[in-house]
Image (cartoon, rainbow, N blue to C red):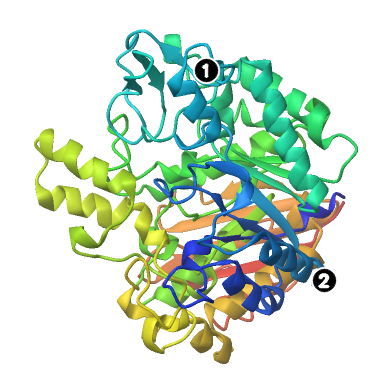
Amino acid sequence: MEWWKKAVVYQIYPMSFKDSNHDGMGDLGGILEKVDYLKELGVDIVWMTPVYESPMDDNGYDISDYYKINPLFGTMEQFDELLEALHQRGIRLIMDLVVNHTSDEHEWFRQARKDRNSKYHDFYIWKDKPITDQQSIFSGSVWEYNEETDEYYYHLFSRRQPDLNWDNPEVRKEVYRLINWWLDKGIDGFRMDVIDLIGKIPEECILTSEKSHKYLQEMYRECFEGREVFTVGETSYATPVSAPLYSAPERKELTMVFGFEHLGLEEVKGNGKWDLKKLDVNELKKVFAVWQNALHEKGWNSLFWSNHDQPRIVSRMGDDGKYRKESAKMLGMILHGMQGTPYIYQGEEIGMTNVKFPLEDYKDVETINMVKEKQEAGWSMDKIMQGIYAKGRDNARTPMQWSAQEYGGFSDHEPWIRMNPNYEIVNVEEAEADNNSIFHFYQKLIHLRKEWEIISTGDFTLLFEDDRNLFAYKREADGERLTVIANFTAGEVQCGLPDEIKPGRGQILLSNYDRDSVGKKMTLRPYESFMYYEETEK
């Protein structure tokens, strides 16, 4: 079995992880201080979001030089030291690869916007006039006027993030060169930002096409073939049908992909991420089941609840008040019991929560643009703020809460973005000292994945499919069965085992309460979940 099928990834957002040089901004030195914490948690891979040189219009996802470290985060020498420290502890490091677009301050674009005859002009997508009314993901038109050449360039995100023209072989050659440079340096792979968009067709407002696969296969040949490289694609537009095409081993594209369908279920369909509706748990279960079955033996799943772009899962689908610990553990168990490679976003392992700041304290460009757009569309400020509280990206970007001391042990200086005020209660120091904490529960989940083969190999079947109170499933392979049953509510729920699961024949591997047995009739406490293993007749 490939090593990554039993691995767990930990995502670090460096700006908000740990400040080592007293400027209120997280940095490489701060990550270096915490490598033993990562080892203690038990993770196998660290994914670090961009630390390259950048004007930080989109917090580093606008890169001005792929070969340099942003001085905000430190130096290349510190990067090398961090890479070695992780490797010494048996932890691999993957970098963020952001090559759908660059910063408008990248030298390629500086040259491109000055002169139509520059060789770099064709590194980007230009038209004499806007040819579509397509809107950018960060609000406004995708077409931005450039006075020097009297043309419009295309940007799917911020106007300061011009899209690269992947149809130009010279662009692809430069991208493959930078990928190989980092791999030669010793990193272990990449998380690829919005990588399914590299095959877009702007003239037709088509965001993904067969070209995405063609370019990824070429990238594999030019960069990954013959190396042991871990690659995961952020493929926001992938479906259960297209996802296996990215990750099927014989196609030689990516190790795995992120699918996002499960994180769009609280949105009013077709209205974008800010227009909210209540989550239907049965809908959530079915989406997971479809993805589990679509990729079983055909590709590989990335399992995640949270990342730097998503709100905190315990606030989103659990209870971040009275039952914060119980619901955070329940959500962790549901995810880690499935087939795929789990991703833990910094702070998830201690149950960090969403925030409710005054509008002026939000930093994210997407949020700031949205407020203006929705006000013009007639939304009330109350509705706008409810959207921000629920879905704003800054929910995930408040500083990591290390201790109850001032600024949460993140820094001894006022941080770049406000702390979540609950850091005095929710922090790593408290979690490590409490044997019943979310942190120790996550340690156990990570250990179980390594110990029990069925978590990586078993097929997937939903149980209690129409019961909105329960999220339950079984995994079966080679005479073994693993059952996960979770109460998805803050009330008590009556539950019985399906007929084929025999009480007394197996064992509870993990429970978020003190359950030591299962039965045909059970009362599940608020957010109670357990994982039950038994051998079956082959």
Residue 508: quarter of image: bottom right
Rendered residue at 62%/22% (across/down): 212
Q: For the residue carrying disc 2, how many other residues have a C-alpha within 10 Å: few (<14), some (14-19), or many (20+)? A: few
Q: Position of residue 377 (x, y in %)?
A: 13, 33
Q: Nearer the viewer, residue 378 or 186?
A: 186
Specify the amino acid type for callout 1. His
Instruction: Please state if 154 lies on the left or on the right of 432 as rendered.
Output: left
With respect to residue 268, does 143 lie above or below? above
User: Which residue in the protein does label 2 denote?
Assistant: 88
Q: Which badge, 2 or 1, comes first in the chain's sequence?
A: 2
Q: Which mark is residue 503?
A: none
Rendered residue at 39%/35% (across/down): 160
Q: SS for tag 1?
A: helix
With respect to residue 103, does 25 lie above or below? below
Q: Nearer the viewer, residue 356 or 485?
A: 356
User: Which residue in the protein does label 1 denote?
Assistant: 121
Q: Inspect this view and state whether residue 394 appears.
A: yes
Q: Nearer the viewer, residue 116 or 6?
A: 116
Q: Nearer the viewer, residue 127 or 336?
A: 127
Q: Position of residue 70 (x, y in %)?
A: 55, 55
Rendered residue at 42%/67% (across/down): 493
With respect to residue 72, does 160 lie above or below? above
Rendered residue at 63%/31% (across/down): 243
Which callout, 2 or 1, points to the residue nearer the camera? 1
